[in-house]
Image: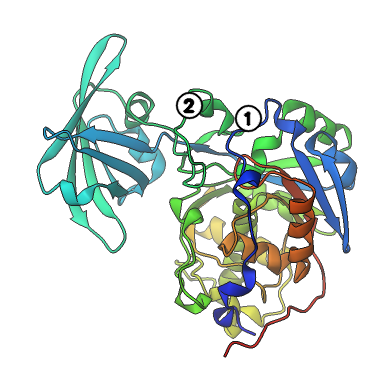
Amino acid sequence: MHPRQLAISNFAYDLPDSQVALYPLSKRDDAKLLIYREGEIKTSTYQHIADYIPAGSLLLFNNTKVIKARLFFQKASGAVIEIFLLEPYQAEYSQTFSQSATASWKCFIGGAAKWKEGELMQIVEKDGHPIQLYVQKIEQQTEAYIVSFRWDAGISFAEILELAGNIPLPPYIKRAATESDKESYQTIYAEQQGSVAAPTAGLHFTENVFDNLKHKKIASNFVTLHVGAGTFKPVKAAFMEQHEMHSEWMDVCKATIQALIDQQGQQIFAVGTTSLRTMESLYWMGVKTILNPACTDIAIQQWDVYEPSLANQNISASQALHSLLDWMELQSLQQIIIQTQIFIAPGYSFRVANGIVTNFHQPQSTLLLLVAAAIGEDWKRVYSYALENKFRFLSYGDGSLIYFKKHFTLEHPKVE
């Protein structure tokens, strides 16, 4: 069955509100860890994750940093307008964050119907000095708006967000963000600003966990994929062919691609679905460069990896990644900054990764489809075990270490 024909109703389960984690644990690595390998399920904690990963393995982390993407402006009438930043408009992240007078963003707008025209303004303070921040609605798109910000303090937009923005907790965490969320909703290795949601699988990693991994000669490496609000986008279509996957910006340097090549023949684990999407996207980009070395557009669209012209190629991960490095040399690139829309669902065959560290995801979500792509119908056993054993779910919840199955079949109930 082609993933286009997958019925999202086959990926439902009952998630009680009581098992949705509204707050993080006081110690990150106290979080419970479910281990799934070759059909066997165990329980441990993140403190001991190194015990379940072979020496010589590589863990790939996403070092994106969550920005204060939620801003509030009040009209003269008293109506509050919420601006939720999605991604820079027609500019790269680093360029946008360094701008010192204006910046344009693609956004969601809460209360857009109450904001007909004109600028809105809020006053923020830096070192006791007031700064006027203005925003104007420029254009309406299908599911979002383009807005333009301006300010006159001569500071960067990154600093403006620190002063004016709020941490964008996911919609299923039904509470207001607190001061402590600024630290707890950020991995300890967060570095590259741009995400509007945390790569939550990494929230449980502490310096102690990294020390244990290093002691066992388990390597760590980093990519950047800026998590967009689309990661929470519900699948409203009955079948996946009617659902548009979100695109996200990834940023990967040549040294990391070389590390993935050097790791061939040993285990590679993605820490989080975003790291996995990045790693697998790199493979398919490499395949595109093998098929057409002169190509300039190697971005991955939603259904690319299931098209016979790509999927039927007998190309190893090493070959694809070597070709990608050669292509970067031709393009005089030290890093790849590009969008990926890769959709990983049952029917997908993993090319680079051998396993994933990930949290427990919402019913009928694309993230749950990714887990089903990894372990087939056993996703139901894993999630039933987690529910019965009182694991905490979603962003601030517990997590799992999942070894991918090599061969399995999925049941597909007949849809009348």
In the rendered image, the quadrant that contains the N terminus is: bottom right
Residue 224 picture location, percent across and down: 56, 45
- The kind of residue tagged 1 is Ile
**Along the viewing direction, whichever of 97 and 288 lies nearer the viewer:** 97
- The kind of residue tagged 2 is Thr
Taking the image as shown, residue 178 lies to the left or right of residue 98, namely: right
Picture residue at 69% right of the left edge, 68% below the top: 373
Q: Earlier in the sequence, mark 1 or mark 2?
A: 2
Which residue appears farthest toward the bottom when viewing the image? 416
The quarter of the displayed image where residue 375 is located = bottom right
Answer few, some or many: residues within 10 Å of disc 1's Cα (few below 14, many 20 plus, some between 14 and 19): some
Residue 366 picture location, percent across and down: 57, 63
Task: Please tell me whether residue 335 is drawn above or below residue 205 in the rendered image.
Answer: below
Task: Please tell me whether residue 374 is drawn above or below residue 179 in the rendered image.
Answer: below
Check contact, mark 1 vs mark 2: CB within 8 A.
no
User: For mark 2, what is the residue?
Assistant: 178
Picture residue at 48% right of the left edge, 41% below the top: 174
Picture residue at 19% right of the left edge, 55% below the top: 139
**What's the mark number on residue 188?**
1
Q: Is residue 174 visible?
A: yes
Task: Please tell me whether residue 264 is drawn above or below residue 225 in the rendered image.
Answer: below
Q: CA distance from mark 1 to mark 2?
A: 18 Å
